[in-house]
Image (cartoon, rainbow, N blue to C red):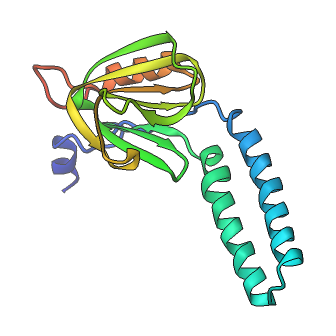
Amino acid sequence: MLKSIISLGIGIGSVMPAVRLRYNKRAFYPTFILLVVALAFFNLAFDLLISVDLLSGLVAAAVSIVFLVVIGLSPILTDHELTADTLNLRQGWMFRASIPLSEIAKVTPVEKGPLRTGVFFDVLGTSLYVTTQRHGLLLLELRQRRRFTYALGKRANKVYFDTLDQARFLSELERRRPTPASPAPRS
């Protein structure tokens, strides 16, 4: 049985481990602090200015905490990831996309990006941005347009994103991308 597993190429060491691709988290700290202050003020005003019972106050506090975790904290806790055959882009629990490596036509470093950061897209264009900084971005050009559910279903064939270690990403991507002669990832 073990021989058959090894002969199929599933042996130890043939599977490439996933690579975490960190992105700049500094942009999220002011947002998190502002949300903490704003939600504390909102809950205090809700409880003091409007006569509410204990249950309503607790519900408002619970909703505020969920909002704070999803919007303020989750982007700080997530990273992009490169697996054997997929690039997973994430920005908290608000955005995620899995792009098969076989769909990537070209990757180009972009020194200067748009002034805006975050997850956004050109309404009439074909570009999607998943950025936390304005410089040192990467442009993924896809073979064809694809739908990005977490970006309001936007169909795009250009994805701008950033990672703190571009050189590592580019070398790992080159190792994993299928070549025209062999559709399997290289190890």
Q: Quadrant of the N terminus?
A: bottom left
Q: Quadrant of the C terminus?
A: top left
Residue 171 screen position, x and y as percent: 41, 17
- Residue at 50% from the left image edge and 19% from the top image edge: 137
Instruction: State which quadrant residue 186 falls in.
Output: top left
Closer to us: 153 or 180: 153
- Residue at 82% from the left image edge and 79% from the top image edge: 50
60 is higher (above) or lower (below) than 134: below
- Residue at 81% from the left image edge and 88% from the top image edge: 54
142 is higher (above) or lower (below) than 149: above
Please count the marks in the image: 0
Closer to us: 53 or 149: 53
Residue 60 screen position, x and y as percent: 72, 75
Residue 119 screen position, x and y as percent: 49, 37
102 is higher (above) or lower (below) than 83: above
Closer to us: 122 or 73: 122
Residue 87 screen position, x and y as percent: 37, 36
Instruction: State which quadrant residue 83 falls in.
Output: top left
Left or right of 69, for residue 108: left
Can residue 185 be seen here? The reply is: yes
Outermost residue, top side: 111
Left or right of 152, for residue 51: right
Outermost residue, right side: 48
Can residue 19 be seen here? The reply is: no
Left or right of 54, for residue 164: left
Outermost residue, left side: 181
